[in-house]
Amino acid sequence: MRYDTLIIGGGLGGLECGYLLSRAGQRVLVLEQGRQPGGCLQSLRRQGMTFDTGFHYVGGLAEGQSLHAAFRCLGLLDLPWQRLDADGFDRVTIGDRTFPFAEGYDAFADRLAEDFPAERTALRRYADLLQRTAEGQWNALSPCPSETEMTTRMMETPAWQYLQENFRDPLLIQVLGGTSLKMELRKESLPLFAFLHGNSCFVESSWRLRGDGSLIADALVRGIRTQGGDVVCRAEVRELLERNGRLVRAVCSNGEAYEGRLFVSDIHPDQTCRMVKDSQRLRPLFRRRIHGLAQSFGMFTVSLRLAPQSLRYFNHNHYVYRRPDVWDFHLNNRPVGGVLASCRVPEDGSGFARQVDLLTPMTWESCRNWVTRRDADYEEMKRQMADECVALAGQVVPGLHEAKTVCTSTPLTWQRYTLSPEGSAYGLRKDCRAPMLTFLSPRTPIPNLFLTGQNLGLHGLHGVTMTAFRTCAEILGRETVWDMLHGNGAATH
Ligand SMILES: Cc1cc2nc3c(=O)[nH]c(=O)nc-3n(C[C@H](O)[C@H](O)[C@H](O)COP(=O)(O)OP(=O)(O)OC[C@H]3O[C@@H](n4cnc5c(N)ncnc54)[C@H](O)[C@@H]3O)c2cc1C
């Protein structure tokens, strides 16, 4: 059988494309190498509980906000979302001071201005910029795009430089970056564009699931199947065959082969290129360029199980830093200098939490010793890091020290489960010094091969969703996808 579109990789990007294309009447097949779909969104089950891996919260889901229409179109709005505290959806503790981030652009600026009164005007300007960013998120799809010049400028400007030029208080500059464990804070390379996008939707409104991230993947898989498509797991694509300058077939490691008219790759672009062994279209220069791109850092995560009634559920995320070095601490992995503590909504309806996740950045470099062999030293390193994370988060979350560590993960774990190069958490590093090289287009030199996923544009649920719509716009046409996004695009089958 020949599919309209074969999708390689069943992470969020691949599943969203599968959903949109099948909704438009295409016969799609998603090939996922893992045992379950979802990539970074898969969850794991331990000791009778499910634990999240790469999802803790998302922004902009309320009516009229930046992700609302997209999630409605994808059938994801009906999931059990829980809105985080409006007066502090995120809290940043640096040393012994805590700064809440309030929901809504005015409230966000005003609340921080209580701690930094001399910066009120600069905070207002920053909040305006965040708002314009959220409002312009779907510009690339719009039939009448606006502010394209501003977008280009924001891609070329380092976020760090913007903060230095617009704020005088060095502590405030750290605080504004303080919720950004969710992106790779690098002074020299992080584009303002990525920094603003990574923050703006959460200021609109922030949400977590009552349940784990696999609810998102499962809902998309159900939608794809209802719309006539399919998702196959344990199907690792090894080779993409090109004939006369177009892809014709995907061959899996188990020998299964699938034919397609179009191909969408949700996996790393370098791995995608390497799968096309003989190609008239992929020139060595293109392959070298993609191969030479750097990866963003990985994550160390700790999943904690709490004794019943030992910790009251907290309806916000808490970012805790030992010192005001939010932009630099990840360069020295040890001792852990910053951690995100995220609480799972209690499923028994009580006011007490049973699960807390801790996350901190971890470089591939620091895992190098164990790439080929996980020994007792590796276990000891993980144990020590977990203890350091608990000690740091325990400064603001009482009773955490008594929690039981159920499992930990390092970039090596991520590489094993999602095949992400260097176990990178957020895909290719975006670099304001080379935006044209590091923000990739969904199109490739092979006319029927398209890319999607976090490696192209921005990462996270927001970024990957925007990119999935862009990829599908290349296939279905911008107007069709714009109509689908705004509720006019009924299914054509
Ligand atoms: C620890 C952590 C915490 C995070 N927290 C949040 C959060 O709170 N909020 C948020 O918005 N974002 C968060 N993110 C980011 C978010 O999870 C990702 O940006 C997003 O899920 C990436 O989706 P993707 O489809 O681009 O990539 P992936 O999820 O990596 O999907 C790629 C898929 O391709 C599959 N694959 C690879 N090679 C092959 C092959 N050869 N054949 C077939 N299949 C293949 C993989 O198994 C995988 O399923 C977090 C990420 C991490 C790592």
Image: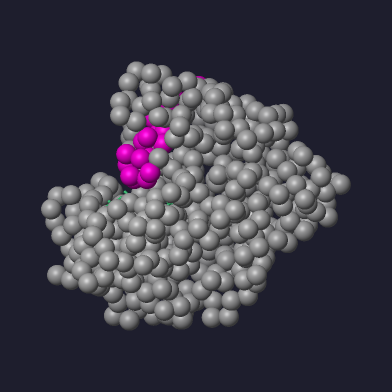
Q: Which residue occupies the foreground of this view, 385 or 213?
A: 385
Above-or-below relation of 157 to 114 = below
- Going by the picture, which residue comes out furthest to the right? 118
Can residue 315 be seen by looking at this rendering? no
Residue at 29 percent across and 62 percent down: it is 7
Query: Which image quadrant is residue 442 in?
Result: bottom left
Residue 3 within the segment the image draws in magenta: no
Q: Where is residue 53 in the image (x, y as percent from the top left)?
A: 41, 42
Q: Position of residue 304 (x, y in %)?
A: 45, 30
Q: How is the image coloured?
A: one colour
Residue at 52 percent across and 35 percent down: it is 360
Q: Where is residue 400 in the image (x, y as percent from the top left)?
A: 54, 26
Above-or-below relation of 478 to 416 = below
449 left or right, relative to 292: left
Q: What stretch is highlighted in magenta?
A: 402-421
On the rendered image, what quadrant is the C terminus found in? Answer: bottom left
On the rendered image, what quadrant is the N terminus found in? Answer: bottom left
Q: Where is residue 377 in the image (x, y as percent from the top left)?
A: 38, 18
Residue 417 within the segment the image draws in magenta: yes
Residue at 31 percent across and 66 percent down: it is 281
Can residue 444 be seen by looking at this rendering? yes
210 left or right, relative to 263: right
Residue at 45 percent across and 58 percent down: it is 456
Q: Which residue occupies the foreground of this view, 388 or 7?
A: 7
